[in-house]
Image (cartoon, rainbow, N blue to C red):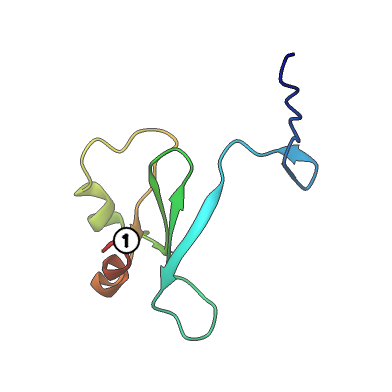
């Protein structure tokens, strides 16, 4: 006898999810960023303030289309351990 697998498509606002996030921690006391997440892809997502200073952005190496830089406090990395 075969095994029947039921797949439920997960959506967000009606759009199929392509990445699931797991909250790891935040250094914010009021619900704002910065926040750290793990993904189901084995990667991390960092929520922080966008680096908008033109001089700082010029120092970024090989920033590709679709990539960006965010600033976070060092303390946020403590949630990796």
Residue 73 image-quadrant placement: bottom left
Q: Nearer the viewer, residue 25 or 54?
A: 25
Question: What residue occupies the far top of the structure in this picture?
Answer: 1
Q: Quadrant of the C terminus?
A: bottom left
**How many marks do you count on the picture?**
1
Residue 18 image-quadrant placement: top right
**Vertically, is 4 above or below 78?**
above
Q: Which residue is located at x 48 percent, y 42 percent?
A: 40
Which element is circle 1 on?
loop
For residue 34, say whether it is visible: no
Image x and y of residue 75, in percent = 27, 74
Image x and y of residue 20, in percent = 56, 46
Q: Which residue is located at x 29 percent, y 61 percent?
A: 80
Question: What residue occupies the far front of the structure in this picture?
Answer: 1
Seen in the image, is 61 located left or right of residue 72? Answer: left
Q: Nearer the viewer, residue 72 or 50?
A: 72
Residue 4 image-quadrant placement: top right
Image x and y of residue 37, in percent = 44, 57
Q: Which residue is mark 1?
A: 53
């Amino acid at each position: 006898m075969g095994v029947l697998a039921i797949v439920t498509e997960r959506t967000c606002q009606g759009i199929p999810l392509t990445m699931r996030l797991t909250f790891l921690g935040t250094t914010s006391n009021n619900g704002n960023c910065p926040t750290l997440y793990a993904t189901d892809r084995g990667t991390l997502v960092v929520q922080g303030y966008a680096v908008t200073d033109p001089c700082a952005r010029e120092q970024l190496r090989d920033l590709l289309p679709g990539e960006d830089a965010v600033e976070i406090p060092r303390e946020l990395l403590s949630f990796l351990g």
